[in-house]
Image: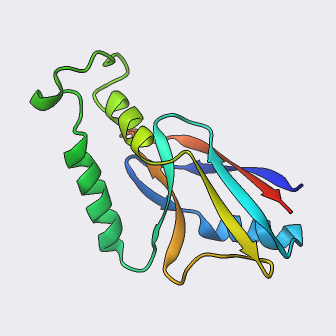
Amino acid sequence: MPQTLLTISTRGQGLYEFTDQVADFVRSSGAEEGLLTVFVRHTSCSLIIQENADPDVQRDLREFFHRLVPPSDDASMRWMVHTTEGPDDMPAHIKAALTATSIGIPIMRGRLALGTWQGIYLFEHRDRPHRREVFLHLSV
């Protein structure tokens, strides 16, 4: 069962596509079929499969989540208790809870069975740059 650990550097909140790195891992495994598990080892970022053709989709997603869960120093978020790591930290945990920290992708004919416009993204929810670890595990 092939596995690897990827490190994804972020520059702050946003979506960071890493589909090519995952596809390279699958290709190098030699597996023709199976199930790839992609797991992020953090609680303030998440994983999503999303459109990778129009950058407006990414911009709109970031804006939606910002409006849904604003920073803890926003007047609407005064109820938050966990604020010691900054106004973006607890909202980042909430955003990660609303999305996914693990996704499964079928492998078909040696390739990711993604749709035409689908890409794999790390969704960074913190303001500061981070180095995020993403674990890939291929079950064949």
**Quadrant showing the C terminus:** bottom right
Q: Residue at x 19, y 47 (%)?
A: 67
Q: Position of residue 129 (x, y in %)?
A: 46, 42
**What is the basis of the colouring in this image?**
rainbow
Q: Residue furthest left?
A: 75
Q: Position of residue 93 (x, y in %)?
A: 41, 33
Q: Residue at x 28, y 28 (%)?
A: 87
Q: Position of residue 31 (x, y in %)?
A: 87, 71
Q: Is residue 2 above or below residue 96?
A: below
Q: Position of residue 60 (x, y in %)?
A: 26, 63
Task: Report which quarter residue 138 is drawn in.
Answer: bottom right
Total labels: the figure holds: 0
Q: Say left or right for 77 vs 19.
A: left
Q: Is residue 8 above or below residue 27?
A: above
Q: Residue at x 46, y 74 (%)?
A: 52
Q: Is residue 135 above or below residue 53?
A: above
Q: Residue at x 33, y 18 (%)?
A: 82
Q: Say left or right for 101 vs 64.
A: right
Q: Say left or right for 136 vs 31.
A: left
